[in-house]
Image (cartoon, rainbow, N blue to C red):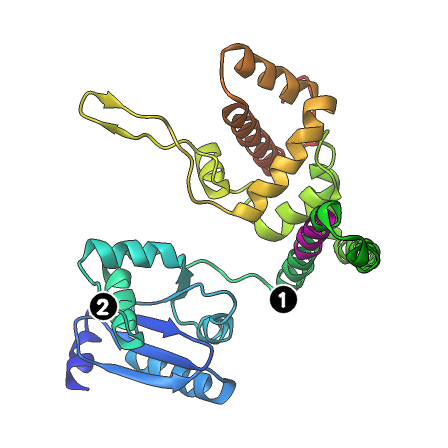
Amino acid sequence: MGTVMNQTSSSLYIGIDVSGSTLDVAIHDTTEHFSVDNETAAIQQLVQRLIALGPTLIVMEATGKLELAVLRALCQAGLPAVAVNPRQVRDFARATGKRAKTDRIDAFVIAHFAAVIKPVVRPLNDVQTEQLQALLLRRAQLIDMLVAEKARLERAHAAAKESLNDHIKWLKQQLTVADRDIDSFLRASPAWRQKEDLLRSVPGIGPGAAATLIAFMPQLGSLNRREIAALTGVAPFNSDSGKHTGKRRIQGGRAIVRRALYMACIPALRFNPTIRAFYDRLRQAGKPFKVAITACIRKLIVTLNAMVHNSTPWNPSTN
């Protein structure tokens, strides 16, 4: 414990490896490691233990909701905690030559990542936003199941078609219920209602896309055009080396937002003259469909970002 106490006078970086049952905690530049159960009472004890250490930064991976309880408890206690994309940690581990993998090793890798990369601590979503996200994720699951069942129906044996048709009918009913629940949830909030009306003033942005942007892109209106494009995952990155100039590629970003905007761009090509003209120029310049539609998504998110920032609805003469 002496090593840790010496660190508290400077900087102390902590990594937490999260699993369904256990939290493995490691402190960078020490041999300090301990494990606690991933349950409420143990998390509260962990919070008190970490408060006493006064860490500079606590980092864990975003592991599909398993980290939310400890992350929320740490943040509510005023501790600087953040969940990061697991891919970033994996890439960091490879770059630093860490090939072995156990929960203990992973915790130290995350602590090292925290000390070197120092990811920015971001405020957590409020409970209402998390509920809206859950409703939208469930809606997306229903759509995926519906698409899959329809594909199965096309090649199904006659003996299986009745079951498939019944399930498709049920999924459509559930999708209607999900849409109604999402709409009711949005309309119950004056701020969300105002934002939804603003977003839906853009031809092509329907209720699903608007709700997805509200739930999964709360930064909309607060970032610059490059930042919002990168967060969406539609900012082109260079791939150059020496005299070689590679193709620009997109990567990362929020897939659920990108998917919603892709679906919005399809009707926008018919009903939004600004997006249509932009798309036509790219296609006439020889750009393939994928490049052109990605550019349209980027133009759309940049436009929406400016609209929310300025609190101004869609205006085809200026957008």
Q: Residue at x 50, y 41 (%)?
A: 232
Please report whichever mark, 2 or 1, sits nearer to the chain's N-terminal start: 2
Decide: is 129 above or below 289.
below
Asked where in the image residue 21 lies, by quadrant, the reply is: bottom left
Circle 2 SS class? loop
189 displayed left or right of 82? right
Decide: is 56 above or below 20.
above
Viewer-proximal residue among 164 and 135: 164
Q: Position of residue 48 (x, y in %)?
A: 39, 85
Decide: is 297 above or below 155.
above
Q: Is residue 22 magenta?
A: no
Q: Position of residue 50 (x, y in %)?
A: 34, 80
Viewer-proximal residue among 304 and 253: 253
User: Mark 1 highlights which residue?
Assistant: 127
Q: Position of residue 125 (x, y in %)?
A: 56, 61
Q: Is residue 128 visible?
A: yes
Q: Is residue 314 visible?
A: no
Q: Residue at x 61, y 37 (%)?
A: 261
Task: Please name which of the two marks, 2 or 1, marks the residue nearer to the observer.
Answer: 2
Q: Please state, as top left, top right, bottom left or bottom right, where the C terminus lies in the image.
A: top right
Viewer-proximal residue among 134 and 189: 134
Number of the label disc, if any, that sits on residue 100: 2
Circle 1 SS class? helix
Q: Residue at x 64, y 31 (%)?
A: 265
105 displayed left or right of 85? left
Q: Is residue 148 magenta?
A: yes
Q: Please state, as top left, top right, bottom left or bottom right, where the N terminus lies in the image.
A: bottom left
- Overall secondary structure of the magenta stretch? helix
Q: Which residues are magenta?
A: 141-150
Kind of residue sitting beneath label 2: Ala
Q: Residue at x 76, y 58 (%)?
A: 185
Label 1 packing within 10 angstroms: few (<14), some (14-19), many (20+): few
